[in-house]
Amino acid sequence: SNWQVSDTKLSFRWELEVMEGLPEYMIICFLALFNTTNDIVYMKYKKNEFDILPHEKKVWADFCKAILVEAKWNKMGYTPLLNEYLENAWVSSSTTINLVIAFFGTGQPVTKDALTSLYDKPGLIHYSSMILRLCNDLATSSAELERGDVKSAIQSQMHEDHTSQQVSREIIADLISEIWKKLNESIYNTPFKDSFINIVVNQARTAHSIYQHGDGIGVQDHEAKKRVTELLYEPFTI
């Protein structure tokens, strides 16, 4: 396909007609996203008579914009400063999508404060998203540097302060620890109920598990298969 990053327009419309402007390989992806999201919206409305489509569209549009920013950086050969990178990366981590969908599935009271807090920055979801993104960057940055993939926090730190890769990794690891402190503090100042707070915190914990031995998603090696098998098929010993 000749469809390039530079051809992409920042126009997000929630309708099937947009498929006409997509390359063939993206049509099935858009259909899956469109139908799955609408199914979730329908089930929530049927149960609670509350339309969550505006919130679903917002997180998906924000995610697509963030991914597009990273694609343009890569195409231009541009390395952002660390804060500039993080401002975009917590959204491109896709954690906000998972957690906003989870919020509406937990039976939480849908108050004005709760809806506002879904998008707070800094805030509970923001910190959880940052932890996942930085854990991902620590696990995958070396391979991404070799492949010339999209930028990571490691590269931004190296570029900004002219530090070595090892020193930059240590700085990012320390940053994760600091964000954990802020996440734990934010638990006590949120309108969310415990059931959703646990999901948000466990999302951050899961990031450490997934990326403990490298890229636990992109690389389907023996360790990844072993973990899936143990989780789904082998009983816990109590």
Image (cartoon, rainbow, N blue to C red):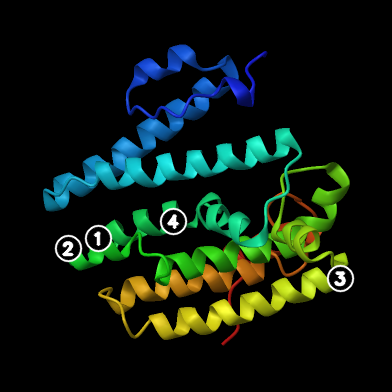
- Looking at numbered disc 1 in the image, what kind of residue is underneath it? Leu
Q: CA distance from mark 3 to mark 4?
A: 29 Å
Which amino acid, by three-letter code, is at mark 3? Gln
Q: Which residue is mark 1?
A: 115
- Where 222 sits versus 42, above or below? below
Q: Are marks 2 and 4 in contact (CB under 8 Å)?
A: no
Q: Position of residue 66 (x, y in %)?
A: 53, 44
Dot 1 or dot 4: first in sequence order is 4
Label 2 near label 1: C-beta < 8 Å? yes
Residue furthest left in the image = 49
C-alpha distance separating marks 2 and 3: 44 Å
Whether residues under marks 1 and 4 lie with C-beta atoms below 8 angstroms apart, the answer is: no
Q: Which residue is mark 4?
A: 96
**Mark 4: which secondary structure?**
helix
Mark 4 residue type: Thr
Mark 4 residue crowding within 10 angstroms, few (<14) / some (14–19) / many (20+) = many
Measuring 50% from the left and 68% from the top, which residue is drawn there? 128
Residue that appears at 64% across and 35% down? 72
Instruction: Residue at 58%, 54% (x, y): give it.
Output: 89
Q: Quadrant of residue 105?
A: bottom left
How many numbered marks have been drawn onto this rendered protein structure? 4
Q: Earlier in the sequence, mark 2 or mark 4?
A: 4
First in sequence, mark 1 or 3: give its number: 1
Mark 2: amino acid: Lys
**Classed neighbour count for the residue bearing mark 1: other residues with Cα under 10 Å, few (<14), some (14–19), many (≥20):** some
Secondary structure at numbered mark 1: helix
What residue sits right under mark 3 in the picture?
Answer: 166
Q: Mark 1 and mark 4: span between their CA atoms?
A: 13 Å
Mark 3 and mark 4 lie on one chain; the one further toward the N terminus is 4
Determine crowd level at label 2: few under 14, some 14-19, many 20+ residues with C-alpha closer than 10 A: few
x then y, percent, for residue 179: 55, 77
Label 2, on which residue? 112
